[in-house]
Amino acid sequence: MCYHYPLPLSLNDYQEKARRFAVYPHPSYAVLALGEEAGELQGKFAKAIRKGVEPNIEDIKAELGDVLWNIANIAADNNLTLVEIAEYNLNKLEGRLERGTIVGEGDHR
């Protein structure tokens, strides 16, 4: 069964809807599950590279969705919205671009 949500689906709408499925015993679950899901995403790309083919887009969509679900719940568990995080991240990147430090290492460039 495929559910269709009204478009456009905002980041905060997604986060609110994703919380319905957040049934886990401890907030650190989503943090640990994020690593697991990111590893599954990496695995899809690694297998495609090994076979010399493009990764299956449906597999990538599914794994990215699992990553997004965990990020949404980690944010909510810490009283943050996805929009807050997205805006913060874009501001950080704009600042790095202005300072000419977009390429480099470290959190505070």
Image (cartoon, rainbow, N blue to C red):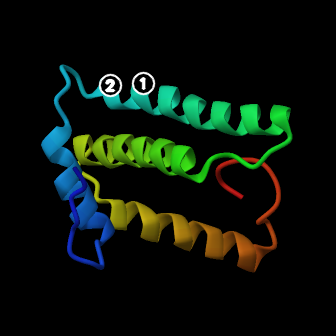
- In the rendered image, residue 90, in percent from the top left (x then y), is placed at 54, 71
Most extreme residue toward the top is 25
Q: Residues within 10 Å of mark 2 (few under 14, many from 20)?
A: few
- Residue located 33% across and 41% down the image: 74
Q: Nearer the viewer, residue 63 or 96?
A: 63
Q: Nearer the viewer, residue 36 or 85?
A: 36
In the figure, is residue 63 to the left or right of 95?
left
SS under mark 2:
helix
As drawn, 100 above or below 58: below
Q: Amino acid at mark 2?
A: Ser
In the figure, is residue 64 to the left or right of 6?
right
As drawn, 27 above or below 90: above
- The residue that mark 1 highlights is 32
- Residue located 59% across and 53% down the image: 57
- The residue that mark 2 highlights is 28
As drawn, 36 above or below 102: above
Q: Nearer the viewer, residue 53 or 23?
A: 53
